[in-house]
Amino acid sequence: MRVIAGSARGIPLETIEEMTTRPTVDRVKENLFNVLMPYIDGAVVCDFFSGSGSLCIESLSRGASQAYLVEKNPKAMEVIKRNLKKTRLEDRAELFLGSYDYAIEHYKDRNISFDILFLDPPHKSNFAKDAMEKIKDLPILKKDGIIVIEHHSNQVFEEIIGTFHLWKRKKYGNTSLSFYLKEQE
């Protein structure tokens, strides 16, 4: 796994040996960022299930202004720290060791909101839908914000979840990406 484009292009990223994390493969990541490219420059991004930090690191490399990486596994957090250092992007990243539910409260209390929120939880879990339900009435996602869910292609997400509606869905073999937008008030 590597950074595909931007200031850290070509730098290999460390992954975690454990089976609880599933790094986004380069082909899926490249297609994901083809969709997000018009929205990345200057964006504030967050990943509630960071794993190796690949999605936020790719975002920073491509011009995002700030990244918030949430990870509950301490070993994975150490990998994220090493990857940020290797790519020299650590000055624009903030790390949160804990689960996404605690992170939601933490960011809400600090009045932090995101342009892009990545949700790539363990497949066959309800964490992505649960996270969306928890943030639906909170200002965690900016008015024109985008939520990206990476999930198994067999897993189906509704067209509308809370205050979010499906914008695009892309399928790449066993992996799908579902892009949601916050409904305008």
Image: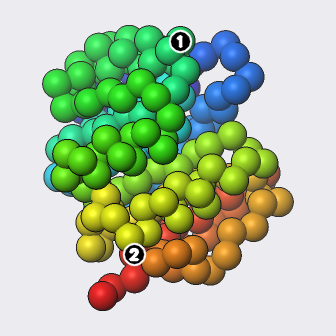
Dot 1 or dot 2: first in sequence order is 1
- Badge 2 marks a residue whose secondary structure is strand
Q: Badge 1: how crowded within 10 Å, few (<14), some, or many (20+)?
A: some
- Quarter of the figure with the C terminus: bottom left
Single out the residue that lies furthest toward the bottom.
185
Give the residue at mark 1: 75
Q: Residue at x 52, y 26 (%)?
A: 72
Expressed as whole percent of the image width and height from the top left, the position of residue 50 reads: 48, 34
Instruction: Indicate whether 174 appears above or below 6.
Output: below
Q: Residue at x 32, y 27 (%)?
A: 95
Q: Badge 2: how crowded within 10 Å, few (<14), some, or many (20+)?
A: many
Out of 60 and 74, give the one closest to the viewer.
Answer: 74
- Viewer can see residue 37: no
Quote the CA–CA distance across marks 1 and 2.
33 Å
Expressed as whole percent of the image width and height from the top left, the position of residue 73 reads: 55, 21
Out of 157 and 6, give the one closest to the viewer.
Answer: 157
Expressed as whole percent of the image width and height from the top left, the position of residue 183 reads: 40, 82
Give the residue at mark 2: 182
Q: Is residue 47 left or right of residue 129?
A: left
- Viewer can see residue 51: yes
